[in-house]
C-alpha cells in the first residue's frame, strides 16, 4: 500500500491535483492507524509526501524522527514498480445493471471463468431463481452484467 500511495501522490502532485493527493495520504494514514506498531520505513515516506502541502508540520515530524537536515532537501520517495502490480481485483456482479454482489478474482482471469464464477454465486442464483438468462456481458476482470429474459 505504501508504494501505491507514493505512486498516486506523485502523479497527483505532478498533475496539480492536491485534493486527491491528500485523500490518498489520509486513506494510507487510516490504514496505518489500524496497525499495532507502524514501522519507521513507512512513516518517513509519509512525512515526505505530506511536506508539499503541510511543510511546517512535516519539518517538525522530520526533526522528531531524528533527522538533522531539513526535509526540504530530502528527495521525494520513489515507488518500487514491482510492488505496484496487483494480483487480485474486485469484480462487480450486476443483474439488469444493478450491483448485486462482488467477488475477488485474479487479474488475469478469463472471461469464461469469470462468467462461471459469477453465475455460481449463491446470492446471484437466488436472485435469478428459475428465470432464463438472455445475455451475460463480461468485461474481465472487473464486471459481469447478467440480463435475464
Image: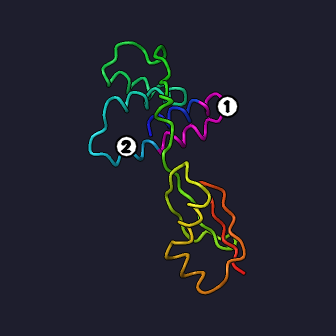
Q: Residue at x 34, y 49 (%)?
A: 34
Q: Secondary structure at mark 1?
A: loop
93 displayed left or right of 68: right
Query: Image quadrant for the C terminus?
Result: bottom right
**Overall secondary structure of the magenta section:** helix
Please say whether residue 19 is one of the residues in the magenta stretch.
yes
What is the quadrant of the N terminus in the image? Answer: top left
User: Residue 11, position in %: x, y?
Assistant: 61, 31
Q: Foreground: 135 or 56?
A: 135
Q: Residues within 10 Å of mark 2 (few under 14, many from 20)?
A: some
Q: Nearer the viewer, residue 11 or 103?
A: 103
CA separation in Å, label 2 and label 1: 26 Å
Check residue 32 in the rendering and tell me which mark sits there, or answer none: 2
Above-or-below relation of 77 to 95: above
Q: Depth check: 16 or 42 in front?
A: 42
Q: Position of residue 68 (x, y in %)?
A: 34, 13
**Picture coordinates of residue 6 (x, y %)?**
50, 32
Q: Residue at x 62, y 55 (%)?
A: 140
What is the number of the mark on residue 15? Answer: 1
Q: Which of the pair 66/115 is nearer the observer?
A: 115
Image height of 22 relative to 41, above or below: below
Quadrant of res 22: top right
Amino acid at each position: 500500500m505504501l508504494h501505491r500511495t507514493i505512486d498516486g501522490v506523485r502523479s497527483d502532485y505532478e498533475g496539480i491535483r492536491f485534493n486527491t493527493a491528500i485523500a490518498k495520504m489520509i486513506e494510507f494514514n487510516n490504514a496505518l492507524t489500524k496497525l499495532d506498531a507502524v514501522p519507521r520505513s513507512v512513516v518517513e515516506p509519509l512525512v515526505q509526501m505530506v511536506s508539499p502541502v503541510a511543510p511546517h508540520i512535516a519539518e517538525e515530524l522530520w526533526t522528531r524522527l531524528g533527522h538533522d537536515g531539513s526535509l526540504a532537501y530530502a528527495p521525494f520517495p520513489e515507488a518500487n514498480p514491482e510492488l505496484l502490480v496487483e494480483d487480485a481485483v474486485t469484480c462487480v456482479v450486476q443483474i439488469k445493471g444493478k450491483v448485486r454482489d462482488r467477488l475477488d478474482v485474479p487479474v488475469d482471469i478469463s472471461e469464461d471463468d469469470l462468467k462461471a464464477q459469477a453465475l455460481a454465486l449463491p446470492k446471484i442464483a437466488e436472485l435469478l431463481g428459475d428465470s432464463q438468462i438472455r445475455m451475460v456481458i463480461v468485461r474481465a476482470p472487473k464486471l459481469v452484467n447478467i440480463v435475464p429474459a
